[in-house]
Image: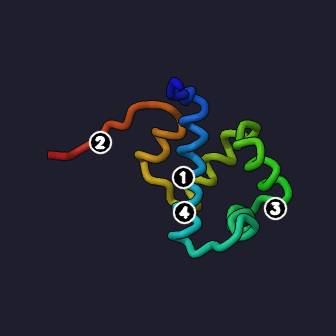
Amino acid sequence: MPKLRMTDQQRREKALMRALEKAKFENDLKYDIDVANRLGIVPVTYLRRKKKSFQTTPLQDFALMARVLHFTGREVCEIVGVPYKEVTTE
């Protein structure tokens, strides 16, 4: 049986879910409702967006998630779908 390949969209959705789970652990947020409250989003709205893999989430709310939950640059690039280039100062 051939191995199924993930689409770019599926890869980005998986990266976002992984970043959210990591943020929940690091910020000691036990439930999705706690995450929604931390973000200042109505819990029902947050849960509805999560169920749809955040496809209907405005960019403004994604930026808020990244800022409040402290996503790394690598995570943001992975979610957006661009290559990560680590900048070093010499």
Identify the residue under disc 1: 18
Q: Name the image quarter holding residue 24.
A: bottom right
Relative vertical location of residue 57 with respect to residue 38 in this rendering, above or below? above
Q: Earlier in the sequence, mark 4 or mark 3?
A: 4
Q: Could you tell me which secondary element the residue under label 1 belongs to?
A: helix
Q: Earlier in the sequence, mark 4 or mark 2?
A: 4
Task: Tell me how far mark 4 sits from mark 1, CA to CA.
Answer: 9 Å
For residue 43, side relative to residue 81 (left or right): right
Rendered location of residue 44, percent (x, y) = 85, 58
Relative vertical location of residue 88 with respect to residue 22 in this rendering, above or below? above
Q: Could you tell me which secondary element the residue under label 2 belongs to?
A: loop
Q: Earlier in the sequence, mark 2 or mark 1?
A: 1
Q: Nearer the viewer, residue 26 or 18?
A: 18
State the residue at coordinates (55%, 28%): 4
Q: Amino acid at mark 4?
A: Ala
State the residue at coordinates (77%, 47%): 51
Mark nearest the camera among 4 and 1 is 1
Task: Tell me how far mark 4 sits from mark 2, CA to CA.
Answer: 21 Å
Asked whether the residues under the numbered discs 3 and 1 touch, taking CB atoms below 8 Å apart as contact, a structural biologist would say no
Q: Earlier in the sequence, mark 4 or mark 1?
A: 1
Residue 43: numbered disc: 3
What colour scheme was applied to this rendering of the protein? rainbow
Relative vertical location of residue 59 with respect to residue 8 in this rendering, above or below? below
Q: Amino acid at mark 3?
A: Pro
Callout 1: 10 Å neighbours few (<14), some, many (20+)? Answer: some
Asked whether the residues under the numbered discs 4 and 1 touch, taking CB atoms below 8 Å apart as contact, a structural biologist would say no
Rendered location of residue 34, percent (x, y) = 71, 70
Identify the residue under disc 4: 23
State the residue at coordinates (39%, 32%): 83
So how many labels did they put on this image?
A: 4
Identify the residue under disc 2: 86
